[in-house]
Image (spheres, rainbow, N blue to C red):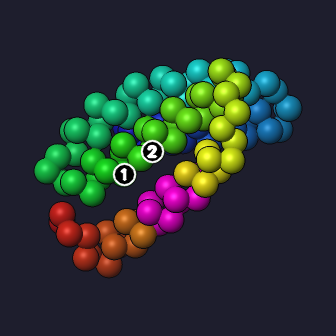
Amino acid sequence: MQSLLFGFTYLWVAINSIWKLEDDGLGWYCMLVTVVAVPTAFTTLPDIGMLVLWLMWASLWFMFFLLLSLRIKIAKITGYWTIANAIVTGAAGYTILIKVWPWL
């Protein structure tokens, strides 16, 4: 179910890009996702790794809300945090695939 949070985010980004729509709606959606993602993080316990990942993703969605809806000028730091999230998420996915995730 939580994968839909990612799926609809990607879909909304694609729709905005294709039809050149304003980003306000996407930003407000990111706020909604943040509100859902934070409690979701705690449902993953005792898997501390997934807890950290969900909190990282929630913080990134919150930064997109601040950037896109409230127009707070945090584009550069949001970009860096996006890269950090991508690297950590990719590394976590790889460790899960090769069955060395510490919390398996």
- Disc 1 target residue: 53
**Residue segment shown in magenta:** 82-90
Q: Residue 83, located in which quarter of the rendered image?
A: bottom right
Q: Amino acid at mark 2?
A: Trp
**Disc 2 vs disc 1: Cβ atoms closer than 8 Å?**
yes
Can I make out residue 12 in this image?
Answer: no
* Quadrant location, the C terminus: bottom left
- Give x and y (percent) for residue 71: 70, 25
- Disc 2 target residue: 57
Q: Is residue 37 above or below residue 28?
A: below
- Near-viewer residue (25 or 69): 69
- Give x and y (percent) for residue 58: 43, 38
Q: Residue at left 38%, top 39%?
A: 2
Checking the image for residue 16, the label placed there is none
Q: Residue 12, located in which quarter of the rendered image?
A: top right
Within the magenta stretch, is there residue 69?
no
Q: Amino acid at mark 1?
A: Leu
Left or right: where does residue 22 sit relative to residue 75? right
* Quadrant location, the N terminus: top left
Q: CA distance from mark 2 to mark 1?
A: 6 Å
Q: Which secondary structure lies at badge 2?
A: helix
Can I make out residue 99 in this image?
Answer: yes
